Image (spheres, rainbow, N blue to C red):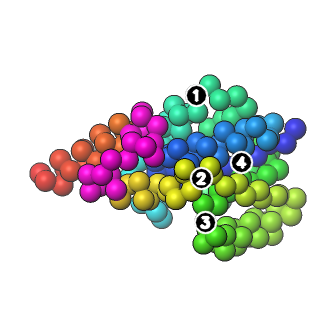
Amino acid sequence: MVRAIYPGTFDPITNGHTDLIVRAARIFDEVVVAVAANPGKTPLFSLKERTDLVIHVIDGLERTRVVGFDGLLIDCVHQYDCQVVIRGLRAVSDFEFEFQLASANRRLEPDLETVFLTPSEKHTFTSASLVKEIAVYGGDVSSFLDPYVNEALRLKLDSKRRVSSA
């Protein structure tokens, strides 16, 4: 059994992320979607909210599970007995950073492989950061997100605006 882990902040999960999860689920026996706490990025959604959004979006997708984690990816890899890390590449510019991560992970765990997947063409330039930036300025991000996530993002931003204006 080959178990893969797909780590990310998923703040929020985009259709590009979902595309990679679906692709990975066709390749591997199980895919662990690992939602990272990643406080250094100052996520808009809490870890629990992000984990719940991912669970909702991939509900019913066989051979997947969603977990939250705080700490080193390698510890999560060991906890869930994963042999492969899945990383998404949207553009050539992503490769250098992803290559560094893969090399560091291999140094920490020599038997761990990293597989790079590319999203379908319609999701190539979709990133959670870009989606949030568009949404903050009132742009329509519905084509980048599951409807449930789109509504959660709208509500979160509305809540932040109310707090800011108070």
Residue drawn at 70 percent across, 42 percent down: 23
Label placed on residue 59: 1
Task: First in sequence, mark 2 or 3: give its number.
Answer: 3
Label placed on residue 121: 2
Report the mark closest to the observer, 4 or 1.
1
Report the mark closest to the observer, 4 or 2.
2
Task: First in sequence, mark 4 or 2: give its number.
Answer: 4
Q: Is residue 68 visible?
A: no
Measure the C-alpha gap from mark 1 to mark 2.
24 Å
44 to the left or right of 136: right
Task: First in sequence, mark 4 or 3: give its number.
Answer: 4
Q: Secondary structure at mark 1?
A: loop
Task: First in sequence, mark 4 or 1: give its number.
Answer: 4
Measure the C-alpha gap from mark 4 to mark 1.
17 Å
Residue drawn at 45 percent across, 46 percent down: 144
Label placed on residue 91: 3
Report the mark closest to the observer, 1 or 2.
2
Measure the C-alpha gap from mark 4 to mark 3.
21 Å
Q: Secondary structure at mark 3?
A: loop
Q: Residue furthest front?
A: 121
Q: Which residue is mark 4?
A: 5
Q: Nearer the viewer, residue 16 or 113?
A: 16
Magenta segment, which residues?
A: 134-150
Measure the C-alpha gap from mark 4 to mark 2.
23 Å
Identify which amino acid the numbered label 3 is placed on: Ala
Q: Around disc 1, counting alpha carbons within 10 Å, would you say few (fewer than 14), some (14 to 19), or many (20 or more)?
A: few
Is residue 145 shown in magenta? yes
Report the mark closest to the observer, 3 or 1.
3
Q: Is residue 103 above or below residue 18?
A: below
Is residue 32 shown in magenta? no
